[in-house]
Amino acid sequence: MVVDLFYRTPRIIRADEKILLRSHTASAAIERTEVGGLVLNHLGWGRILGLKTGIFGKLGDDRNGEFLREGMDRLGIRHHLTFDGSASAFATIFVDSNGDRAIYMARGATGELTPAEVRSRHGAFIRRASLVSTEISQLPLRTVLAILLFARTHSIPTILDVDVPPSDAIGSLGTRAELERALKLATYLKPAKAAAREIVTGNGRDSLKMAEAIRSRYGNRAVIITEGDKGCSIAARETAVRVPAFKVKQIDSTGAGDSFLAGVFAGLRLGLGWEQIGRLANAAGAVGVTRLGAFPTGFEVREEILDLYGEALALPSPHADAEPRETAIGDSSGEVGEFFDVALQELAALRGGLNIAAISRTVEIIRTALGRGGRVHVTGVGKPEHVARYAASLFCSVGTPATFLHATETLHGSLGQVHPRDVVIAISNSGNTDELCAAASAIKEHGAKIIAVTGNEVSELGRLADVVLHAPVETEGGAAEIAGEGERATGRTDLLDDPRILPRPAADLLRRGDDRSGRRNSR
């Protein structure tokens, strides 16, 4: 995950040379500032081709980190990040008039991700993947090994992009033994041609022979070597094939291998043969070099890739949100039909009134808290207590550790469960439940963030919260409209006063607190 700073230069210079850039002012000399980074570029182009993609790792808590996350969110790339790195990575890239480039990388937080963090902080997120991509470029080799081993333990295939030659990796990123082990662990290898020449010697300049030799040596399912405008060579268990490149006008070769690899992802996802995978990858790589920058800016380039590929492909939709489908309820003359009618009406009303900005702010608060070592707690009183317990469990299931916080116990010692850097999600329909509001007030004074999920945004809970997710219910699902009463009873209504709940004699008996034998009875 790297912020790329692009400069236009008349040519790429050698050591001890000087050259003038396009402008004499530094700000004007920067052609563009772009989202970049080897793996993030893979995932961006993967989204263009319709894949669900996500990234984990470490950023700095800085403007570059925010810039990178904004880029991920634009394309719908899920992210599971920590923000305790020294600084987010950046690269200075000089591009000449032919589209060739020189890159100087400052890896920053990327180089600080540790093997222990892979397992403890990101393990649940990784386990959701059907394919894991990592790189030999900026990550420490020990961390690359941790990723590959974790994926293998959970039967997830991996792709290792060997972007720098072993002579650059050994010493700066790790040892030769670590590099050798990483090459063996990867399900698929994609070395750049310069890296392939160093991995196996004695094969001259023939990339297909190099790919076959590497696969034979390390036992990978397939080895794919990119050759720029010459295309690619693929050596797999069942085939060895050269796939020629598409002819396009090159603007910037930065990230050509990254968009290429996204084509490999998509081809594997579709179950294509290796020659077809090579053609799709070459098409993606070709489109990638026709624009400045390595990260795609929008989904419109998808059609360019498919046009170059030249055959119909049933790629998944690249858009994160599909139009909702109409649901047929059938006969609604009975109570069951009426319930579904009401439920759908309420859901439609909720959807129409959703505050997307508040939801986005909520996601950002949670991600920031997790990135700084904080935790998520969910709380509620009455029926929302059961919802809160389930929500905490659901968070854990999708890779965000969360715990249930007992609201009424918070004021009796359980506040110590919450750290000032944590986030507490408080659920209340009325937003005025006495116990919950008292707990929220204490949590607020303690320094933690509060997210309110409530049907009353002007309530006491809404006033205390950092963000309010307004989810009102106009009509309950049952004819008596009592399904939500369990939470509203606390501090607002007494269910014993409602004859729909209990017959009057029973209510009176419970109100007096007497059973038939005259003993006191607790409510």
Image (cartoon, helix red, strand yellow):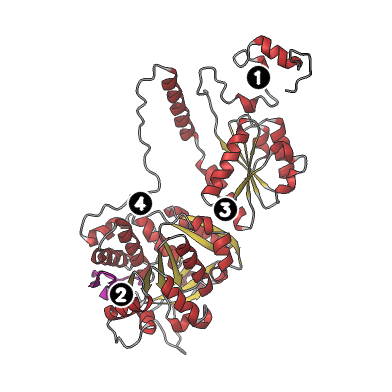
Q: Give the distance between the C-alpha atoms of the residues marked 3 and 4, in whole angstroms.
A: 24 Å
Q: Earlier in the sequence, mark 3 or mark 4?
A: 4
In the rendered structure, find residue 495 and report the number of the disc placed on it.
1
In the rendered structure, find residue 475 and report the number of the disc placed on it.
none
Pinpoint residue 304: horizontal percent, then vertical percent. 27, 59
Residue that label 3 marks: 367
Report the label total: 4
Q: Residue at x 48, y 80 (%)?
A: 169
Q: Earlier in the sequence, mark 1 or mark 3?
A: 3
Q: Earlier in the sequence, mark 2 or mark 4?
A: 2
Q: Residues within 10 Å of mark 3 (few under 14, many from 20)?
A: many
Q: Give the distance between the C-alpha atoms of the residues marked 1 and 3, in whole angstroms.
A: 40 Å
In the displayed image of the protein, which residue is found farthest to the front?
A: 517
Pinpoint residue 253: horizontal percent, then vertical percent. 35, 72
The one of 144 and 113 positioned closer to us in this rendering: 144
Q: Is residue 195 magenta?
A: no
Q: Nearer the viewer, mark 2 or mark 1?
A: 1
Q: Amino acid at mark 3?
A: Arg
Q: Can residue 97 be spotted in the picture?
A: no
Q: Amino acid at mark 2?
A: Gly
Depicted 172 relative to depicted 431: above or below? below
Q: Give the distance between the C-alpha atoms of the residues marked 2 and 4, in whole angstroms.
A: 26 Å
Q: Give the distance between the C-alpha atoms of the residues marked 4 and 1, in whole angstroms.
A: 50 Å
Residue that label 2 marks: 228
Q: Give the position of the C terminus as an image quadrant.
A: top right
Q: Is residue 249 magenta?
A: yes
Q: Which residues are magenta?
A: 226-253
